[in-house]
Image (tube, rainbow, N blue to C red):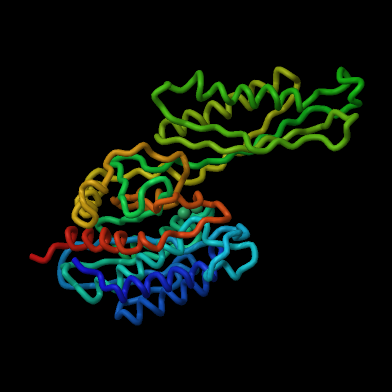
Amino acid sequence: MSISKALIDEAIQWRRDFHARPELGYHEQQTSERVAQLLERFGIDVNRGLAGTGVVGTLRNGQGPTIGIRADMDALPIQELGQCAHTSTHQGCMHACGHDGHTAILLATARHLSETRRFSGTVHFVFQPAEEGLAGARKMIEDGLFEQFPMDAIYGLHNWPGVPAGHVVINPGPMMASLDTFEITLTGKGCHAAMPDKGADPIIAAAQLILALQTIVSRRLSPLDSAVISVTQINAGEAINVIPETASIKGTVRCLQPQVRDTVEQLIRQFVEQLPAVFGIGGELVYHAGYPVTQNHREAAAAVRRAAVTAVGESRVQWGCSPSMASEDFAFMLQACPGAYLWIGVDGEHPGAALHNPYYDFNDRVIEPAIAVWTQLVEQSLPVT
Ligand SMILES: [Zn+2]
Ligand SMILES: [Zn+2]
């Protein structure tokens, strides 16, 4: 399979243009318009407006199954610190997660497939907004993605620092953790700090509760199950000589299995209801269910593996990795439709910055192998008979 040098060069240019003009979740107007215009230029049917800035391009080529491939388009509220010709021109906003690369890869794949057409069936190219914490994938589903564009399977990728450039990593089970957040309010009775017996101290209760929450993972879950409970914010008090009336604790929970996720939520609830009460403090929990576990479907993951082995060679494909405890809203798509999510390595000779780092810049060398993987996946999933 040959991907033309001209197409790779064009894709690199798109990628750098996206990098220079990043847009935050649900505000990807320019990016989305550019994506739609390019797809139209390639002769692909374009649907605009799912989840606001979402774009779906549809390429039909005879009878056969239908698959979707998804890219995310949004950037992060981070001030870019790296300096290069395509540094972000938008103050306080940058592509620090490589979604500029994902978007360029999918556009180039669409163009390549529209020219080569060695498949029989339909491909939907799904460009989604707002992956970074705002659940753009769920919004596209709510807006009718899978009703308007029924698919036999959907696939997505993420660039992955720590893995050599162009290597593919795929797991037949969970790839990324679920993401929930919690907010706990502890209400006691404020008083003079010199007379603690006159009040009820929510700070003491908060300190005990934070330590107690850590025993959920260490003492209540099986050592073979995975979960992270991180308390990330504590707020209480305004004066050094006052015991405050309230304290607030916020944090995040990550799990790899739905049943572990349910157990952790129940135990946090139990601790918040019962532990502060011992100190005469009221506890209230608000638990926000965020992204589910990104759980690959076995057959779809095997299809990615086969495609990747053909595209980049067996020695560059890792099957059966440890999942990441970070999260991904593609999880919603995998709940609604069979499919799989893969990582493609981005490390050159000298590893670059981590995802979400202000010096991060997508490695353009990954564009070509990524197009090759998607192209193989389409040609193998939608064979010409
Ligand atoms: Zn990210
Ligand atoms: Zn990302």
At a point 50% along the width and 67% down the height, the residue shown is 19
Q: Is residue 357 left or right of residue 160?
A: right
At a point 54% along the width and 66% down the height, the residue shown is 84
Residue 358's spot in the image, x, y percent?
A: 58, 55
At a point 45% along the width and 35% down the height, the residue shown is 255
Residue 58's spot in the image, x, y percent?
A: 30, 71
User: Would you identify the image quadrant in which residue 54 lies?
Assistant: bottom left
Q: Residue furthest front?
A: 349
Q: Quadrant of the C terminus?
A: bottom left
User: Would you identify the image quadrant in which residue 47 lies?
Assistant: bottom left
Residue 251's spot in the image, x, y percent?
A: 61, 37
Q: Is residue 327 left or right of residue 320?
A: right
Give whichever of 65, 127 is nearer the camera: 127
Give whichever of 326, 192 is nearer the camera: 326
Q: Is residue 378 visible?
A: yes
Give whichever of 222, 266 is nearer the camera: 222
Q: Is residue 332 visible?
A: no
User: Would you identify the image quadrant in which residue 377 lies?
Assistant: bottom left
Q: Is residue 34 left or right of residue 63?
A: right
Q: Quadrant of the N terminus?
A: bottom left
At a point 48% along the width and 69% down the height, the residue shown is 18
